[in-house]
Amino acid sequence: MTLAFPVLQELKPDRAQATAAGSLASLIWLTLGAFAIGSEGFMIAGLLPALARDLNVGLPAAGHLITAFSLVYAIGAPVMAVLTAGLERRRLLVVAMGGFALGNLLAALAPGYAALLAARLLLALSAASFMPAASGYAAALGGPERRGRALSAVTTGLTLAIIGGVPLGVLVGQGFGWRATFFGVAGLAVFSLFGILTRLPSQRPGVTAGLGERLALAKRRDILGVLVTNVLTVAGTFTVYTYLSVFIASVAGLGSQALAPVLLGFGLAGAVGTQLSGSAADRWGARMIVIIAGWLALVAYLAFSLSAALGPARAIPVLLPAILIWGLASWGLITAQQARLVGLAPALAPISLSMNSSAIYLGSAMGAAAGAVVIANGAMERLGWAAAGFGLAALLSVLLSGGSTSGRS
């Protein structure tokens, strides 16, 4: 899973570097790379039942493929940022995307569970290296005047992956087998790699914060509060999302053919939530939007639990709207939380946002692990309750933290 929220790497480019290559059109190759990473990361949840059957492992063990990926990403992102700080930026992008292509090929050819797990660890390290570097490269190339448009090249790739890449990947997996999806993503990665090599200009490394600076910022109570909330929020999301295919089959009797449309609806709702929460946070304050989104997510999780109690015949009218509310709220909440971090420490935003990325992946690892425990105990219908526990804890952490002095964060 690649719940990728790209962040600005701590770059301080000079004006000559920022205006090099003129047009931002060449960033389409970073868009493609982000699309490949986002598609691979999210669609694997829909492939877990087939993976478990083919590899002769239980569903919880298959879910650990997501847990391991997320944990390695959470730890690897800041470590890789420090270790690769001195590398020329295009070279780093080439190495990272090359590793991602190789990881997908190894996953497609994996003879067993251990080999697939190893391939996913390589994918995690590659994605953790590529996504921050891609955002930093785009920001430097765009310069102050075009930074927003440049960064949108990366976020657009992720958005398109969530809306279209994931449902398409699930359909490919259902039609041609789960290995075909990894082959397909490997092809996208190679295409992106070719474009990066031939179309992107070289870019000198910038100034990157060390691990000590990151840890010092995390000691701030307000920053730590936001990061903890994000861990809990994403944990709730991935408690259900990791096992969504088997959950909707068990609760509502929806077969595998219904998964792609459900994921499409979730992705569209998430895209809408991202856009609405950003503008709403500017108008009413990010903390208020986080509270509203937190309540909506909690209602969605409780609706999941209700649908499990209703039985398959009556569950669908409750479950499907709840999935849309869940997508809207969960993505909107994370977007508003990013705005809170920037508002709390504008000058340190690149560092806090990169730490936020690690918090998000730590949360996804926790959620996938929690879901595995629930399923291992034969309590599929209780996934909603487990997610609601995380959602309630996240909401309480916001309510008890209070607002900033301005009341806007």
Image (cartoon, rainbow, N blue to C red):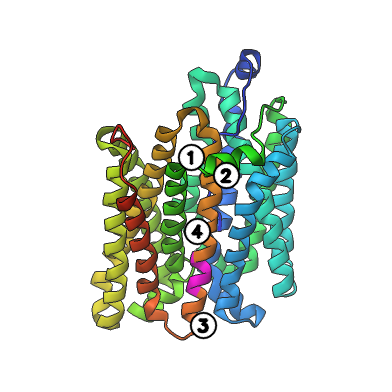
Above or below for 336 versus 379: above
- State how far apart marks 4 and 3 are (Cα): 20 Å
Q: Nearer the viewer, mark 2 or mark 4?
A: 4
Q: Which mark is residue 363?
A: 4
Q: Which residues are magenta?
A: 367-371
Q: Nearer the viewer, mark 4 or mark 1?
A: 4
Above or below for 133 versus 189: above
Whether residue 177 is visible, yes or no, is: no
Left or right? Give the position of 47 relative to 397: right
Whether residue 132 is visible, yes or no, is: yes
Q: Residue at x 65, y 13 (%)?
A: 16
**Dot 2 alpha-carbon crowd within 10 angstroms: few under 14, some 14 to 19, many 20 or more:** many
Picture coordinates of residue 379 (x, y %)? Answer: 42, 83
For residue 1, which quarter of the picture? bottom right
Q: Which residue is mark 2?
A: 34
**Dot 3 alpha-carbon crowd within 10 angstroms: few under 14, some 14 to 19, many 20 or more:** some
- State how far apart marks 3 and 1 are (Cα): 37 Å
Q: Residue at x 66, y 78 (%)?
A: 55
Picture coordinates of residue 9 (x, y %)? Answer: 60, 34
Q: Nearer the viewer, mark 4 or mark 3?
A: 4
Q: Which residue is mark 3?
A: 376
Q: Is mark 4 in CB contact (under 8 Å) with mark 3?
A: no
Q: Amino acid at mark 4?
A: Gly
- State how far apart marks 4 and 1 are (Cα): 23 Å
For residue 63, which quarter of the picture? bottom right
Q: Amino acid at mark 2?
A: Ala
- State how far apart marks 2 and 4 are (Cα): 21 Å
Q: Which mark is residue 156?
A: 1
